[in-house]
Amino acid sequence: MYSLAFSNLFIGFLILTLLVRFWLASRHIRHILAHRNAVPAEFAAKIPLVAHQKAADYTVAKTKLNLVLLVLSTAVLIGFTLLGGLQTLSLAVFQRTGGGMIYQLALLVAFGVISGVIDLPFDYYRQFVLEARFGFNKMTLPLFITDMVKNTLIGAAIGLPLIWVILVLMEKSGDLWWLYAWIVFSTFQLLMLALYPTVIAPLFNKFTPLADESLKSRIENLMGRVGFASQGLFVMDGSKRSAHGNAYFSGFGAAKRIVFFDTLLARLAPEEIEAVLAHELGHFKLKHIVKRIVMMFGISLAFLALLGFLKTQLWFYTGLGIDPLVVASNDAMALILFMLTLPVFTFLLSPLTSIGSRKHEFEADAFAATHTRSQDLVSALVKLYEDNAATLTPDPIHSAFYDSHPPATVRIHRLLAQ
């Protein structure tokens, strides 16, 4: 009885989520096309109509691709669960491994490989067709393949030991395994924050010290004013993959470093770069990073506790088309099912996370306006919106679900009022 009820609940949420996402996408497309032929008044003197129309067409193209991916991912989800795909895969892997930890790791690897193969054509299309059509792709096919291989090898080298530890805890540490797994996972996340800037990121991009002494002096003065210490100022060769530009700081503790995309430095004036960086530093000084980490840890603890309950419930498996193995552990299957179904049940909560993220963006903008000229940040944002073909006219409801940053018009109005 519980199995059927959970199966019906899953189907109901899946249909509801699918309908809501299609409704949001259709609203978004209609809203953007309705405003395609007129630049918003506050941007009319700064962004030409042709750039505004490019942003509209680019956003519509991405939204339509996302709808195709939504249909495909829903079909794959149903195929893996209710239509027995995972059950068939589990039996095939079990027959070849004979159970034990090797079976569990092999099942996770097989699932990951199949998912990656399904995603690969769309990743290729996004990079070499959609991005190229709008002039953003700078990546070559050899680099695309190299990145894919590196991501796979690094993911295996880092992810498999972590998964092994979690599976061992699930099997051997009793009812509170989820608490111990959370401690391991949280420690791993903090370790990655410290190691990523200096160990992993350089495997994909070249980072060179900022050579412009005048700009370097300006930035160091800003850091001195706001009380931020960095391990260094670096320029990343983002242009070898994309024409999009950005700036960020990464790392944790003493390993913090500030990174500028070379595309951003080529486009913005020094005072605009300073203003953009002041915004990013605002996230640090206002403890947004710490707050996000704490929130992430809290959410992961709640989800692991939920998984700790679900993995012991027969209806969780059978309601999703799985007959649990009697002669082998089902912990890996529980992880896969939880990962597949969680987005179905949590999507409607997306605006809650967006509210917090947008609040932080407004606060970081205000921080930047305090330590630099707000007009410089506005000028930089306008250039970035134009260069990245970011739409100036998103549908408000769609934006509330998907966008971590406030709409351009709202954000700039607040800046100009300060």
Image: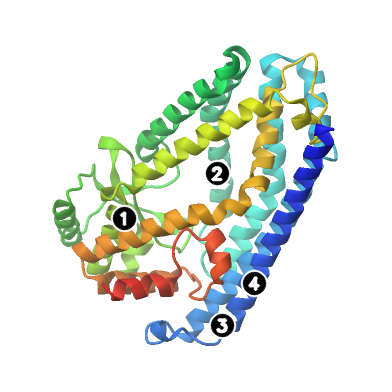
Query: Badge 4 local density, few (<14 within 10 Å), some, or many (20+)?
Result: some
Q: Earlier in the sequence, mark 1 or mark 2?
A: 2
Against 38, residue 362 (above or below) is above
Viewer-side label of 1, 4: 4
Is any atom of residue 154 visible in this view? Answer: no
Query: Badge 3 local density, few (<14 within 10 Å), some, or many (20+)?
Result: many
> Residue at the location (17% across, 48% down)?
227
> Secondary structure under badge 4?
helix
Query: Is residue 43 or residue 51 the one in the foreground?
Result: 43
Viewer-side label of 1, 2: 1
Instruction: Read off the residue under disc 4.
Output: 27
Instruction: Read off the residue under disc 2.
Output: 146
Q: Earlier in the sequence, mark 4 or mark 2?
A: 4
Across and down, in percent, residue 252 comes to: 32, 38
Q: Amino acid at mark 2?
A: Thr
- Residue 343: numbered disc: none
Viewer-side label of 3, 4: 4
Viewer-side label of 4, 2: 4
Q: Earlier in the sequence, mark 3 or mark 4?
A: 4
Q: Earlier in the sequence, mark 1 or mark 4?
A: 4
Q: Earlier in the sequence, mark 1 or mark 3?
A: 3
Instruction: Read off the residue under disc 3.
Output: 36
- Residue 280: numbered disc: 1
